[in-house]
């Protein structure tokens, strides 16, 4: 087979593996999203993906779904097979035991316990192994895992809805609803695929939100309310509906307020103070990472959004842009201390789509070598 044709075939089956991997969104954290396809003579004989943390990895799922012998077939995997004992045994041992004729890997696993070892084990066993097919797409599918495994910090998505003139509320503070019902369902889908959601005390005071994904199917995220002095009422919905919630406060929060929340089953997490006397967001992210929270959706108001941007803590920015103008109102982002345009925070658009009457702008923190993609979210 010509090299070009072989590459085209490899990319076609790797795209299928990527589509399978996405089925694990919202269920596999802190593990990566992985899809696998087994092919013989141009026919798919098995497919698999990582369904849930602690369950079989994609390779084992595909092996168990095989309709015929795997020996001699081509095995496509979006991420390097693991080579260490974690929650499950090493996948690379199962691959070697079934003797595929060829293994095609999308991207190398950044986990130091794996990185390159799984690929080397396959090659040492005499199995032809190719790495890097649709590598950029495979790495992008696991941007959350790649950041988390390298830094120990969750991948942070900052999301807000605003009018065309950049307001998240009218001058009175009224904001229901800036965006359309389809955009609201999209926002709930975002919640469902994140480990945790964070808001500030101001958002709870203004909106008394539930912070669930009730409009879509999926698991409600862990809710985190940043309330430095625990000034919120224990009767707020997020504290009284029995769902998982953490109140992040500083040591200056009154002990009695802490006890009131703890009696309702709310965990109060004590965090150090930043220079302004508020919860230190970097320390909070570090502690969340230690709890295996690998992705965080920030839905706070202008104060929280400004803090995350000012501290350069947002990896992804999603802006729901509504075709409305209110004039004087509450800005989406406050003062970042930037006085020159060439010091502006840089993001790269990845996708621009529509939900109802709104535009969804999806941008990532700009890094060297960024590319721009336009398509569906």
Image (cartoon, helix red, strand yellow):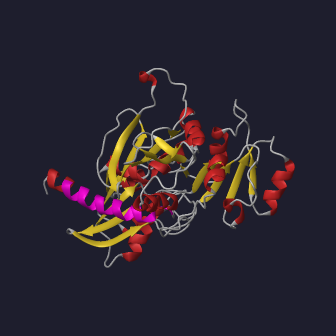
Which residues are drawn in magenta? 8-26
Q: Position of residue 261 (x, y in %)?
A: 78, 57
Q: Residue at x 32, y 52 (%)?
A: 353
The answer to which of 271 and 126 lies nearer the viewer is: 271
Predominant SS of the magenta segment: helix
x 67%, y 60%: residue: 238
Is residue 327 toward the left or the right of residue 102 in the image? right
Q: Quadrant of residue 172?
A: top right
Quick check: can you spot residue 102? no
Q: Residue at x 30, y 45 (%)?
A: 373
Tell which of 306 and 4 is nearer to you: 306
Question: Who is closer to the viewer here, 63 or 117?
Answer: 63
Q: Look at the image and say whether residue 24 sits in the magenta stretch.
A: yes
Q: Residue at x 65, y 53 (%)?
A: 204
Q: Quadrant of the C terminus?
A: bottom left
> Can residue 266 be spotted in the picture?
yes
Mark count: 0
> Residue 224, position in %: x, y?
65, 53
Q: Residue furthest top?
A: 340
Query: Where's residue 79, x and y in %?
Result: 40, 55
For residue 343, side relative to residue 359 (left or right): right
Q: Residue furthest right?
A: 256
> Is 277 a magenta residue?
no
Left or right, residue 207 beside residue 242: left
Where 108 sits versus 237, above or below?
above
Which corner quadrant holds the N terminus?
bottom left
């Amino acid at each position: 087979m010509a090299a070009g044709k072989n590459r085209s075939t490899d990319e076609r089956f790797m795209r299928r593996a990527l589509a399978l991997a996405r089925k694990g969104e919202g269920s596999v954290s802190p593990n990566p999203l992985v899809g696998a396809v087994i092919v013989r003579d141009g026919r798919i004989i098995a497919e698999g993906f990582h369904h849930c943390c602690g369950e079989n990895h994609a390779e084992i799922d595909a092996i168990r779904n095989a309709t015929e012998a795997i020996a001699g077939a081509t095995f496509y995997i979006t991420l390097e097979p693991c080579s260490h004992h974690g929650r499950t045994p090493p996948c690379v041992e199962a691959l070697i035991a079934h003797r595929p004729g060829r293994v095609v890997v999308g991207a190398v696993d950044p986990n130091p316990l794996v990185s390159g070892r799984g690929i080397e084990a396959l090659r040492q066993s005499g199995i032809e192994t190719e790495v890097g097919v649709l590598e950029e797409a495979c790495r992008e599918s696991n941007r959350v895992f790649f950041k988390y495994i390298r830094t120990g910090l969750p991948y942070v998505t900052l999301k807000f809805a605003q009018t065309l003139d950049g307001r998240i509320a009218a001058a009175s503070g009224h904001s229901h609803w800036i965006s359309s019902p389809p955009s609201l369902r999209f926002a709930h889908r975002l919640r469902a695929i994140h480990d945790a959601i964070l808001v500030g005390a101001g958002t709870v005071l203004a909106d008394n939100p539930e912070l669930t994904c009730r409009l879509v199917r999926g698991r409600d995220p862990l809710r985190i309310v940043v309330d430095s002095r625990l000034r919120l009422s224990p009767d707020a919905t997020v504290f009284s509906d029995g769902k998982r919630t953490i109140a992040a406060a500083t040591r200056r929060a009154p002990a009695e307020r802490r006890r009131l929340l703890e009696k309702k089953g709310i965990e109060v997490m004590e965090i150090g103070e930043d220079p302004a006397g508020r919860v230190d967001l970097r320390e909070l992210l570090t502690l969340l990472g230690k709890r295996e929270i690998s992705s965080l959706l920030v839905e706070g108001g202008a104060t929280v959004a400004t803090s995350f941007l000012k501290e350069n803590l947002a990896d992804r920015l999603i802006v729901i842009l509504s075709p409305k103008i209110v004039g004087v109102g509450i800005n989406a982002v406050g003062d970042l201390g930037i006085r020159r345009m060439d010091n502006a925070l840089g993001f790269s658009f990845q996708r621009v789509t529509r939900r109802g009457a709104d535009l969804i702008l999806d941008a990532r923190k700009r890094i060297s070598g960024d590319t721009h993609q336009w398509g569906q979210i």
